[in-house]
């Protein structure tokens, strides 16, 4: 049981570290650009009025 908690803690710590690094890199890029970066996915479709 002790090994399970140790492994679970290591996984959680790794995920937290990974998310923190990604967040930090994104903040650094935002500062470099001078604003907040936003991801936008547009889907275009053609509507024809017949």
Image (tube, helix red, strand yellow):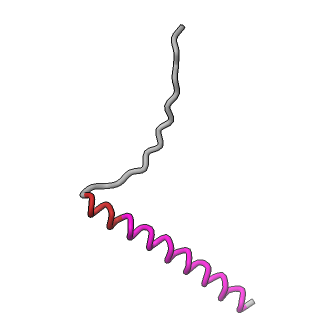
- Quarter of the image with the N terminus is bottom right
Where does the magenta region start and end? 2-26
Give the residue at x 49% y 31%.
44
Give the residue at x 52% y 23%.
46
Give the residue at x 38% y 70%.
24
Instruction: Determine if the magenta segment contains residue 5.
Output: yes
Task: Tell me the quarter of the picture where residue 14 sits.
Answer: bottom right
Single out the residue that lies furthest toward the bottom: 2
The spot of residue 35 in percent (x, y) is: 27, 55
Relative to 27, is 43 above or below?
above
Left or right of 24? Residue 31 is left
Task: Tell me the quarter of the picture where residue 15 sits.
Answer: bottom right
Single out the residue that lies furthest toward the top: 50
Instruction: Determine if the magenta segment contains residue 23.
Output: yes
Relative to 32, is 37 above or below?
above
Q: Which of 3/14 is in front? A: 14
Single out the residue that lies furthest toward the right: 1
Q: How many marks?
A: 0
Task: Tell me the quarter of the picture where residue 50 sits.
Answer: top right
The spot of residue 17 in percent (x, y) is: 49, 77
Give the residue at x 47% y 43%.
41
The spot of residue 8 in percent (x, y) is: 65, 81
Magenta stretch prevailing secondary structure:
helix
Left or right of 17? Residue 35 is left
Single out the residue that lies furthest toward the left: 34
The spot of residue 33 in percent (x, y) is: 27, 58
């Amino acid at each position: 049981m002790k090994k399970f908690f140790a492994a679970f803690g290591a996984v959680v710590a790794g995920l937290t570290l990974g998310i923190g690094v990604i967040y930090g890199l994104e903040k650094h890029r935002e500062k470099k650009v001078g604003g907040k970066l936003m991801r936008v996915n547009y889907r275009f479709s053609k509507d024809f009025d017949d």
